[in-house]
Amino acid sequence: MFRIPKCIVIDQIKLKITFFLILITYSFACFSQTNNKVVLGADQLNLFLNELSNKRVALVANHTSKIKVGNQFVHLLDTLLKSDVNIVKVFSPEHGFRGIADAGEKVSDGIDKKTGVPIISLHGDNKKPKNSQINDVDIIIFDIQDVGVRFYTYISTLHLVMESVAENNKKLIVLDRPNPNGHYIDGPVLENEFKSFVGMHRVPIVYGMTIGEFSLMINNEGWLNNKVNCDLSVIPMKNYYREKSYNLPIRPSPNLPNSKSIDLYPSLCFFEQTPVSVGRGTNMQFQVFGNPNWENLSFSFTPKSMEGAKYPKHENINCFGIDLRKHPNNNEININWLLFAYNNSNDKKSFFRSGFNRLAGNDKLKKQIIEGVDVKKIKKSWEKGIKDFMSIRSKYLIY
């Protein structure tokens, strides 16, 4: 009778054991991945629902203020109304409650058609809730997805809401959400003389904090007007790690349609105050940049009027430029693209528009580019400000 050699039997046993171990490892990885899913502040109604009982509640919210229930996204407004919370009004930031308005576009007050709840715009002339708009409210809930960049105006809205809450002795609850640019810190720290709605705080352009952490810093560093203190609670997330990449399920604003645009936004937003297009009016917003005069470049795009970009820069004009859709993700602000654009400008005197210094947070960056300072020296000039900021930031980190 033929006998299988002992060495073959042992090898087969080893193979089965190896396969079994691989199967267990894979199953554990899948289980861990499922159980390590980020749990948003808004997902944890049990942590703040009791506090809303018999209170008049207002939301600061927009189209991103949603939680996933099964396979659907349900708005926080609908969720709270279903839980018998008395929602008396909604305050909406730049881009409006539905998130379709252009950057800087005036958004009118209105009524939410689905629920009948009044909506008050916090953009244009009414960026800060007036006393008359907050008198009939006990608690305000802030739940908006941010992208962790100083000139992205949702943190300015947060600041002004906190100020109004403090001045009127109300309560604010911030429901925390991930920062998709939370894995690094970079850029010049804003100088006080360049404060505006696109930069209200002495922080770098990319500051590496969630909006909940940022609210704690605003409150405890005395940054509110007259150093008033807001009655503030932050509902933290579970399973969030700032070093881990996070893909936003809903675009935070009309011209940040995907993860690549959010990644490139801190570097490309400088072009908003130059003659260079960042792809507004295309489906490649903040993933390309170009100008009609760069005809020596092979890549091109033509901005068209569309929702979220009614009057795009260089509308209906072919722009030649750079396609960054396959560019590796950034761990720093890329100044090389700005230098490239300036050096290839045929009208350097009018390259920088009036709002450039407000985006940069100082007048040094513009001067450095005009003088031809190299990238390493530009970055070196940011180091002390970043170091000083990081010591402040460390006091308010939750994650």
Image (cartoon, grey):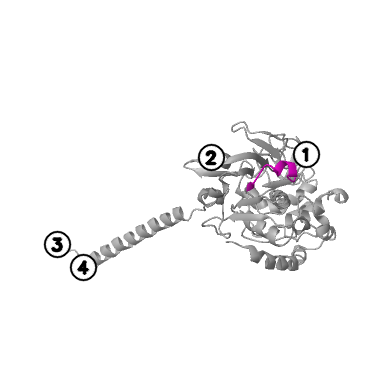
Label 2 and label 3: CA atoms lie apart by 78 Å
Q: Earlier in the sequence, mark 3 or mark 1?
A: 3
Label 4 and label 3: CA atoms lie apart by 12 Å
Label 1 and label 2: CA atoms lie apart by 49 Å
Q: Earlier in the sequence, mark 1 or mark 4?
A: 4
Nearest-to-viewer mark from 4 and 2: 2
Q: Please name the residue that numbered disc 1 is placed on.
A: 314
Name the one closer to the observer, 347 or 183: 183
Q: Is residue 122 above or below residue 218?
A: above
Task: Please rate how many residues cluster around mark 1, counting C-alpha atoms within 10 Å: few if below 14, some from 14 to 19, many from 20.
Answer: many
Q: Secondary structure at mark 1?
A: loop
Q: Please name the residue that numbered disc 2 is placed on.
A: 84
Residue 74 falls inside the magenta stretch: no
Q: Residue 184 shows which numbered tag? A: none
Q: Amino acid at mark 3?
A: Phe
Q: Secondary structure at mark 2?
A: loop
Q: Amino acid at mark 4?
A: Lys
Q: Earlier in the sequence, mark 2 or mark 3?
A: 3
x, y percent for residue 158: 69, 50
Q: Would you say residue 212 is visible in this rendering?
A: yes
Nearest-to-viewer mark from 2 and 3: 2
Q: Earlier in the sequence, mark 1 or mark 2?
A: 2
Label 3 and label 1: CA atoms lie apart by 83 Å
